[in-house]
Image: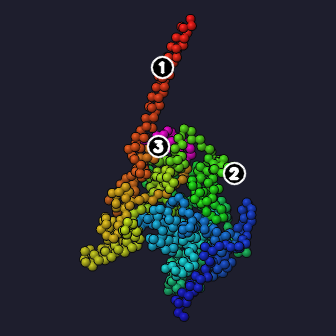
Amino acid sequence: MQKPAAALLIVILGLGSLPRSILASDGDVKLLRSDSAAPYVHRITLYDHDGTAIDPDDEFAGPYSPRMTCSKCHPYATIAAGWHFNAWNETVSAGRPGEPWLLVDPQTGTQLPISGRNWPGTYPPEEIGLTNWRFVKMFGRHIPGGGFGEPGDEQLRNAPEMLRWGISGKLEIDCMFCHAADQQHDPAEAARQIEKENFKWAPTAALGLAVIRGEARKAPDDWDPLMPPDPDFPERAGPQLIWDQSRFDPDNRVLLNITRRPPAERCYFCHSFRQVGVKANHGIAAGRDVHLAAGLICVDCHRNGLDHMIVRGYRGEARERGKPDIAAFSCEGCHLGTDDPDNPGTSLGGRYGAPHPQHRGLPPLHFEKLTCTACHSGPWPKMNAKRFQTALAHGLGLATREREDDDPPHIVGPVFARQHDGRIAPQRMIFPTYFARVEGQSFVPVSPTEMREVAEEIVAEAKRDHLIERDTDVNEQITQVLVSLASRQNESVFYPYFRDRELHFGPWIPYRWSIAHNVRPASQSLGIRDCTDCHADDGPIFFGSFMPTEHATLAETPSFTMVSLRGDDATFTKVWNLGFVCRPAFKWFGFICAGIIALIILHYALAGIGAVTRRFR
């Protein structure tokens, strides 16, 4: 049998012997358990993906498998259905729209929201041509494993990248992303390994257990890990492990510093943001979340059970998920209490010493129309919405010299719009820009790859017809062609989604997601000074403005206000706000009128008393 065929057989047999799909149940397996509030000291034996105990002296020892190692005590399949790993599962309630993945391609001007959760305004990965493999390659830098990175065996056999999966292995859930109690685990190192397609090696490298030499992406499709490196092509040797012997004790056990309550720093790698642009509020000027300042950590509110279904903490989540007990972890549930009279611990409110807000003088209408975060969260709003970069969209957390403040995608905030329950909330927003095919009344996105292929064909045809010089820079010509296509409207099968400005946002529909942090203290909430913090022509919650995009293919970008974003009547709003601006004058007018009326009443009262007195003399 020839070597390539033999290697292919090894790969196929290897796929068949991979661990069962994450959909499999943990069954009745008796797991090790301590049943104590005391932390368990994880001085444990590590196992590779075949379930073999790792011996660092064994030159053929494979990387450690979180699944095979952690499942000795923890139900991996149950955990794998948790919120951070189940975006692919259509049976899970998507809940309130959150921040999507953003497919960005500067050359085609693409910034497209991607999500497997079917949030309105997002597109599933497969619709834009993203297989599990391509999704992990593109967004794996901020994925803790599982989900799209750990497809089932049947999916692997049908995947166009089956051979590459056989080389790189699955991207298993790396528990240490969250549960590391110190900085020993490096998520940025995991991102670097994923970029090299060293999927199954990433947890080992991130934990510093070994150094990885070689890259799976350079290995040929017939790569055999048991064969010695080819001296003619040393770069194709594939990943090799150099273990840190100091991390293993004499019994080849490793001490993992694990906590049940991950510190906030573990969350920041994926859930951080920064304001950019002119007068950006960051560094020493940036406000710290009042809860963190008080000593709380993220998981005090965003907690979970063994199922790892993280509490997101918005009103209505308990009803959507059918779990009344998690209502206590929303703003209202924590500060004001819940509607559960059988549980005084939650119905009374005040968890962790949370103050019970009185909101004296605030009309109840505000609680029907606004979220708590509208007044208490995010940076103090200005008349012009600011631009933000986030970890998921801009790769924050990864060291680079290339990140600039004007890098796409263009995210603005806070904008005050109605969220899924109709209440006004501070949100971040992005206007999707991409080419699409017109199919009936719908627009089907075209992938950047396909658009570049179209542009390349146009450039090649122009060169054949001698319309452009043959030695002209191809990339520059492709960019010019794409800009030309973007300037057209209904002239070709490709429709630039961002061109129609005739209708109210027309097809130019923004994608928004609500934000809750950073929370400002009550002394810095909107309305603390007076009603004109909001009810005025210079009140950002009504007449703050924002620019949808600054993309180079747009010659001119329109500007919108919060009122127009919500579809409210601007004239009526201004008249209504005028009442609050003139409110002090109305108050004094009322006091004066009341004083005059009181004097008139006093005059007639004294006159009546005088008349009665004279009558009885």
The residue closer to the viewer here, 289 or 426, is 426
Q: Residue 319: x and y, percent?
A: 59, 57
Circle 2 residue = 342
Q: Residue 443: x and y, percent?
A: 39, 66
Circle 1 residue = 600
Q: Is residue 249 left or right of residue 116?
A: right
Quarter of image, res 472:
bottom left
Magenta segment: does it hold 526? yes
Q: Sequence-wise, which precedes: disc 3 or disc 2? A: 2
The residue closer to the viewer here, 315 or 510, is 315
Asked whether disc 3 touches disc 2, contact meaning CB atoms under 8 Å apart, the reply is no
Q: Residue 237: x and y, percent?
A: 54, 82
Q: Which residues are magenta?
A: 520-538
Q: Residues within 10 Å of mark 1 (few under 14, many from 20)?
A: few
Q: Residue at x 68, y 78 (%)?
A: 53
Q: Residue at x 57, y 76 (%)?
A: 152
Circle 3 residue = 534
| Amino acid type, label 3 | Cys
